[in-house]
Amino acid sequence: MCSNKIKIYANPVVMEAELNDSRTAQMLRDVLPVEAQANIWGDEIYFSIPLNADVENPQEVVELGDLGYWPPGAAFCIFFGPTPMSIADEIRPASAINVIGRLSGDAKAFKQVKSGTTVRIEKYFE
């Protein structure tokens, strides 16, 4: 059985997460490890990954700690607070995303990550 656990490295943050059973999450597992430069948009980190997935159960509002895939930009997203599109305390991506997993720790730790930081995502086996 393959593990749904991943580890995200974004200096100074190292955090475990768990991917869900969606088709998009499975596709991500198949291309790991990936590494890219972080872009910051409000309290969201995003970056392009080598994945071309269709829209799957798109969500316009997500929860703190959700991980997503943004089909228009082929991007992996880490949500740790409101974005410029948010109304009040909601967490709203630029447009609908596929939620593909959740962080296992305190999502707000990602506030320490600066734009341009190298982010690495890899499979994690305990």
Image (spheres, rainbow, N blue to C red):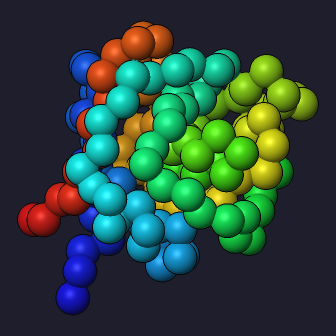
Left or right of 34 in this view: 89: right
Q: What residue do we see at 66% from left, 19% from top?
A: 42
Residue 26 in the image: state x and y as whole percent.
Answer: 42, 73
Residue 119 rendering spot, x and y as whole percentages: 32, 30
Q: In this view, does 19 lie above or below 35?
A: below
- The percent position of residue 107, horizontal first and vertical second, equals 46, 37
Count every numbered label the image shows and give the total.
0
Of residues 15 and 121, the one nearer the viewer is: 121
The image quarter in which residue 79 lies: top right
Q: Quadrant of the C terminus?
A: bottom left
Query: Percent position (x, y) of residue 108?
Result: 48, 29
Q: In this view, does 62 lie to the left or right of 111?
A: right
Determine the residue positioned at 30% across, 36% down: 35
Q: Is residue 114 above or below residue 36?
A: above
- Which residue sits at x=59%, y=29%? 44
Measuring 58% from the left and 52% from the top, which residue is drawn there?
A: 69
Residue 66 visible somewhere in the drawing? no
Whether residue 21 is visible here, answered yes or no, is yes
- Where 112 falls versus 31 (above or below)? above
Q: In which quarter of the image is residue 125?
A: bottom left
Horizontal side, residue 83 vs residue 81: left or right: right
Q: In which quarter of the image is the N terminus?
A: bottom left
Q: Is residue 114 found left or right of 62 in the rendered image?
A: left
